[in-house]
Amino acid sequence: MTGLPDLGTPAGRYRMLRLIRGFEELALGLVRSGAITGGIHPYIGQEAVAVGVCSALRPQDRITSTHRGHGHVLAKGAAPDRLLAELLGRTGGLNRGRGGSMHAADFSLGILGANGMVGAGGAIAVGAAWSARQAGEDRVAVAFFGDGALNQGVLLESLNLAAMWRLPVLFVCENNGYATTLPAATAVAGSATGRAAAFGIPAAEVDGMDTEAVRAATAEAVARAAAGEGPGFLECRTYRFEGHHTMERLMKLRYRTPEEITDWRGHDPLPRAAALLPPGLAAQLDASVTEQLAAAREFALASEHPSPEGALDHLYADGLRPRAGAAGTAGAAGVSAAAGAAGPVGVTESAAGTGARA
Amino acid sequence: MRLSYTKALNRALADALAEDPAVCVFGEDIGAGLAGPTLNLLDRFGPGRIVDTPLSEQAFTSMAIGAALTGRRPVIEFQIPSLLFLVFEQLVNQAHKFSLMTGGQAAVPLTCLVPGSGSRDGWAGQHSDHPYSLFAHAGVKTVVPATPTDAYGLLRSAIADPDPVVVFAPAAALPVRETVTWELAPIPLGTARIHRAGADVTVVAVGHLVHEALAVAEELAPEISVEVLDPRTLHPFDWPALAASLERTGRLVVVDDSNRSCGIAAEILATAAEEMRLLAPPRRVTRPDGTVLPFALPLDRALQPGRHQLRDAVRAVMK
């Protein structure tokens, strides 16, 4: 189970769809049981976008992801066991338990992070694309974002910069129909592709439930970008089968009708991808995914909880240790910040999120 | 050599660009060098590294973060201090948080340079802010050089630093010139500088106010011996230097061009009160709470810390 998943074959792509689906189901169970604190934004239903896009990327290409990022991170090659450990806040997690679901990253694989701010990854990807060109490297950057991000000014600004400077970046809009509960139809004037076209960026609308269609459109855009012909834009029409986040389950919201959800479930990307495989192969791949996820679960739950003393580890890349939250309780720590001394941390791990002083 | 503050910033950028091919500069009107620090850099280093940006502060700041995450070492010049409010999301919520949130996988070696922070005498409400305390509070490394040599040395260190750093070059310090007889060199972040030794009162002065503090110290010299301490970096702050100064004087006045509530002066006073030797209640001289600088020059001046108030504060802590 090591190495990049082989997304070059229909079997590899089906297996990744199944892996993402199974991972999300496993994570949902762990949220329900309370093992994962906070919540997650399940990707179930949208898997074809992550798999279709990432199957057309090269290992050196980079991505920025979103709050609903598990699918992108897995499809770009992150280890499911380490992603799951991250969701559980364990030291074995991709981010050593410091980021959680919304910030999962693996820089060694060109995954520049899921991001909690809608639209934020767009211009970061533009910067990565600019950086690669400056360094003379053949790398394309892909920014995933949702329909909600279409109304973020910074994303529109980044379309302009990418187009002006003909940067090797691909904007992938996952239009799942809703910005949380607000229907895209009531939020987006004009169209997603029309907005990209206004900046002179070639834009295509793709069936985001069809892995092969997303893959083909991505391959075309990546080839153009890598050839120096500038950015591309894909609007992938897709749907999330679950709520916006895991808290929604308890709330019985009515912004989507059961009929609408059922109808979209009829377009589930998994059976569609399975139909491309020889008989029996899908079941075999399903079994190997089940096995892999069982091992991931075991790894993640066995991984250690981080120790509270390390709550401020990595705050600065140069190892600078800031002062403790309470003066006088940390001995000389309060006056040793400039010397870079590691003083005890003034907040306990559980209180850290609320800014409470010890 | 006679060195101006702006020329020092220009030299620091040029030397950093020459030394490290990863260094690049983003900003508005930097090709023309409108604000001064980037003058002639476009000719010397080309448009690949001196990148004139459209007026899209949020996107080009995010873009610089993306570049910093992938091997570049960008500097952004912001012509107007208030533009920092526009990119607070990018600097505080993205750049500053990447290292911790990624568990140390990522570093964001990004420098933001604000030439002409604070009042520029007549540019009114939206061009006259001095928001360094906000960045220090958020934990972003924050530098406010007072002199040309410090401007050179601290900007060099900021660019070399693996974390985001905001460098405020106060408008009122830009006219300062210095005769430099030594080789310009990087100055480590987080180290204070004693500009004038004294025995009675420590005056901590931020940025351009160092020069006001020195003038007041000179004026008061016959009656009070004033030590002038320039922190130079507000985060990380050189607390040991302050503690050592207060061991000598035991009295403290802070002069700071921030709004009073939650400004850096408040933090300095609080830390001194909690942890250091004080013989008398400390004082601060700041802008009023929630200041918006009015346009008319007498009004603009009325709200900024001045010599008169500083003199009164120094005398007050001596009582």
Image (spheres, rainbow, N blue to C red):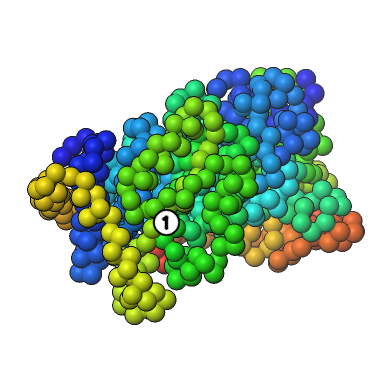
Residue A209 appears in view: yes
Q: Residue B133, relative to residue A135: is it above or below?
A: below
Which of the pair B211/B84 is nearer the observer?
B84
Q: Which residue is mark 1?
A: A237
Give the chain letter at badge 1.
Answer: A
* Residue A239 rendering spot, x and y as whole percentages: 37, 61
Residue A218 locus on image (x, y percent): 41, 40
Q: Quadrant of the C terminus of chain A?
A: bottom left
Q: Position of residue A126 (x, y in %)?
A: 53, 40
Q: Quadrant of residue B281?
A: bottom right
Give the quarter of the image for residue B20.
Answer: top right
Residue A117 pos. (x, y %): 48, 56
Frontmost residue, A199 versus A77:
A199
Q: Which quadrant of the rendered structure holds the N terminus of chain A?
A: top left
Quarter occupied by residue A267: bottom left
Residue located at (77% from left, 53% from top): B128
Residue shown at the point (39%, 79%) measured from the top left: A254
Identify which residue, B74 or A112, lies in the foreground. A112
Counting the numbered discs, the total is: 1
Observer-nearest residue: B283 or A138? A138
Q: Is residue A248 visible?
A: no
Q: Is residue B249 left or right of residue A141?
A: right
* SS label for mark 1: strand
- Amino acid type, residue under disc 1 in the picture: Arg
* Residue that appears at 62% across and 27% down: B49
Q: Residues within 10 Å of mark 1 (few under 14, many from 20)?
A: some
Residue shown at 79% from the left, 59% from the top: B125
Answer above or below: position of A72 versus A189.
Answer: above
